[in-house]
Image (spheres, rainbow, N blue to C red):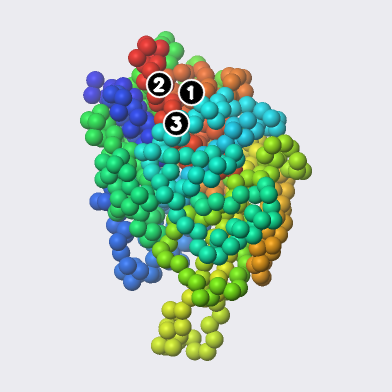
Amino acid sequence: MSNTFDAIVIGSGISGGWAAKELCEKGLKTLVLERGRNVEHLKDYPTATKHPWEFPHRGGASLQLEKENPIASRCYAFDETTEHFFVKDKEHPYIQEKPFDWIRGYQVGGKSLLWARQTQRWSRFDFEGPARDGFAVDWPIRYGDIAPWYSHVERFAGISGNKDGLETLPDGEFLPPWEMNCVEKDIRKRIMDNYKDRHVVIGRCAHLTQPQEIHLQQGRGKCQARHLCHRGCPFGGYFSSNSSTLPWAARTGNLTLRPDSVVHSIIYDEKKGKATGVRVIDAHTLKMTEYYARIIFVNAATLNTNLILLNSTSSRFPNGLGNDNGLLGKYIAFHNYLGTITASVEGYEQEYYSGRRPCAVMMPNFRNVYKQEMDFQRGYMVFYSAGRSGWGRAVEGEQIGAGFKESLTEPGPWGVFMMMQGETIPKEQNHVALSGEEKDKWGVPLLKVSVGYDANDEAILKDFHTQGAEMLDRAGCKDIRTASSKQAPGLDIHEMGGVRMGHDPKTSLLNKWNQLHACQNVFVTDGACMTSTGTQNPSLTFMALTARAANYAVEELKKGNL
């Protein structure tokens, strides 16, 4: 009985934290399993308030650290101030059948301690897109189904933004927005004067610009615009599982949190026709223990969720739990981050700004919105920011001494950085599978990843370069340079799919409530459930889907249906 709960949640990151909060609030005794170590808010942020000179390499990643972590070190947030929140490459191997940079954070809170915190709602066009444009399968929900749940999670998490009234980027429950600087405002005006179908708005992000009572009750405070978020925020200024949902769940008295618990597989009872529990391996002793519950939420992050379900085999499901159609692990998609553009801006040398704003300026997708009009499918969001520090600086004269140091205190000329976030089309050949030979130290098969770009991604990149450069030129920018990062998929850290939602059990794994078609007391609400990727950042949608599914699961439990 000590190992039996009402609900089990696998994973404690953004979606797992939300599952825990919702289930515990509704009275369910809930076990949260996290394969990594425990991390408590405030207590376990060792670098959060350190100065640059307190680090051996002034905060940078040493050559040795980069050499030991060739994958993790490619992530923008990885350095000696944050390395303790990242999976070390050699400790958790996987098999790259195609180049794929799998960025992971194995600890309580998962990657919610490291995420970029950009939060936009999907629009009706995103949920309608696959059916209209003939790719993937039809989403079993529409914007109207999830809109109340967007509001639900926005109010609790705290999302800053402006109500812009755009059909392509619905408004939400916003705290006061951040402000564009003078150059960004001027670029915005010139773009919108020249293009009637393009709307430039301030970014929306999970930062408390003006904490409300619900945030104060969580013990969180105002964002200080330090831009040290990846170290863990001692103010609780940005949303994370550690500062928000998990402590809130714990307050109910219904939460049991078990770190260092590597989930091996889900237990399926063939007589009962449902899942009954989870097999867990202690990360240190390697002892296996079984835990039992009436419902199970799988929120291990996209690829690990696929791994767990693929490894959950039985006579009924020899190819993985719920995998009657053989599609588990297939149709993995991600966001195309290949394109960047830089430019210089003249004439604002007397202007500056304060703080380190945690969001960029953004432009929602303007390609193939109302109809198919391009020679590629779907489209891309555009983000840009302008600043002075170090842009295009060339220091003349002495390169050492007091004069050199004094010159560095003066800001350089203005520059602009622009990037794309493109939708990729889910394809069956983009997949993950289990290795038949190699296992990790816990006896779990290694994951084989075979995910790559296609011609559609290259066409989107080309269009972004053309349109982005043209927009900056019309905005008066100079020295415009386009580039491709040539980065492998995965470094976007927006992998989605493999356990996709849909109407038909023949072509999807989950129904409209995120239940496995073939095992309805198992719910998947992290990125693995996504039918398509949209062009927006995905985490807000993961949160909303999780809250919606948890509410439904509790209602079904009360009715005796689960």
Q: Quadrant of residue 16?
A: top left
Left or right: residue 32 versus residue 482 is left
Query: Mark 2 and 1 residues: CB-CB less than 8 Å, in contact?
Result: yes
| Residue type at tag 3 | Trp
Nearer to me, 369 or 506 = 369
Disc 3 vs disc 2: Cβ atoms closer than 8 Å? Answer: no
**Residue 225, x across and y down, in percent:** 38, 59
Mark 3 or 2, closer to the camera:
3
Q: Which mark is residue 513?
A: 1
Q: Amino acid at mark 1?
A: Trp
Residue 125 to residue 398: above or below: above
Upstream in sequence: badge 3 or badge 2: 3
Q: Which residue is mark 2?
A: 553
Badge nearest the viewer, 3 or 1: 3
**Is residue 363 in view from this perspective?**
yes
Q: Which badge, 3 or 1, is on the more N-terminal residue? A: 3
Res 306 visible: no
Q: In front: 560, or 150?
A: 150
Q: Amino acid at mark 2?
A: Ala
Q: CA distance from mark 3 to mark 1?
A: 13 Å
Task: Give the labeled residue for mark 3.
Answer: 149
- Residue shown at the point (38%, 38%) measured from the top left: 155
Where in the figure is residue 369, as x and y percent of width and height? 67, 39
Q: Quadrant of the C terminus?
A: top left
Split into 4 quadrants, where in the image is the N terminus?
Answer: top left
The residue that appears at 55% across and 30% down in the rendered structure is 143
Tag 1 secondary structure: loop
Mark nearer the N terminus (2 vs 1): 1
The answer to which of 80 and 127 lies nearer the viewer is 127
Q: Position of residue 20 (x, y in %)?
A: 34, 32
Q: Residue at x 37, y 12 (%)?
A: 559
**Does 197 appear above or below 347?**
above
